[in-house]
Image (tube, rainbow, N blue to C red):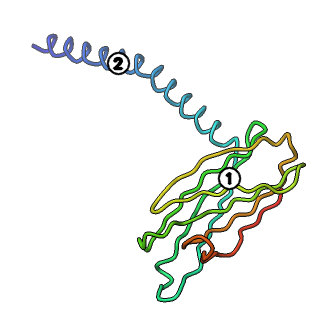
Amino acid sequence: MRKLRSVLVGTALAGALAAGIAAAPAQAATATTAGTASVAQAQYTKHWFSGSSSFGRGESRGDRSDYKGYWYHSNGRYYFDFNTYDRDRDRENTYIDFYYHDDNGWHNRRFSTGGHREWKFSFSDKNGFDGFRSRIGEGRSGDFDWGNYYRHSF
């Protein structure tokens, strides 16, 4: 009986040891993959920017439209990603004016939404891209409640 118990304990220990040896390379591979992913994410730093529209007659501060986003520089390009929210649901659109500057002067891109929307785009740094400014407004054409500009130079 004692010999049978010793054989069973020895077999269990050998099995556990074999399982541990087999699991070690898988754990090492997982650690290496996680390390590689964190290095890839650490190659750039997100720079946050945001803004709110002004508010019209009869509206409270809570009814304003707003946006929040970030930009980063990677591999010779400036990447932008931002979300816009039209909070008052009054059937008037929210507009984002995004002005950027390069060797050829100032350029404008206008984005529009009636609710929530996300935009992603990028610019090459080869044309002398050296800054941007953005603002948000809400209303009807010619009567926007524009907020203040967010400005950034590189």
As rendered, which of 19 and 150 lies closer to the eye?
150
Quadrant location of the C terminus in the rendered image: bottom right
Residue 79: give x, y in percent of width and height.
Answer: 68, 46
Measure how far apart labels 1 and 2 are at the Cα level: 47 Å
Q: In this view, does 147 lie to the left or right of 123?
A: left
Residue 40 image position (x, y, % from top left): 64, 36
* Residue 117 x/y as whole percent: 50, 55
Q: Where is residue 56 in the image (x, y as percent from the top left)?
A: 54, 84
Question: Please, what is the three-letter code of the amino acid marked with disc 2?
Answer: Ala
Residue toward you, 141 or 72:
141
Relative side of 78 to 69, left or right: right
Circle 1 or circle 2, nearest the eye: 1
Q: Which residue lies furthest to the front in this view?
A: 142
Query: Which residue is depicted at the point 49% across and 28% down?
Result: 30
- Residue 71 is tagged as 1
* Residue found 85% across the figure and 39% down from its top: 126
Q: Which residue is drawn at 76% across and 66% down?
A: 151
Q: In this view, does 144 lie above or below 27?
A: below
State the residue position of label 2. Answer: 19
Residue at 75% x, 36% y is: 75
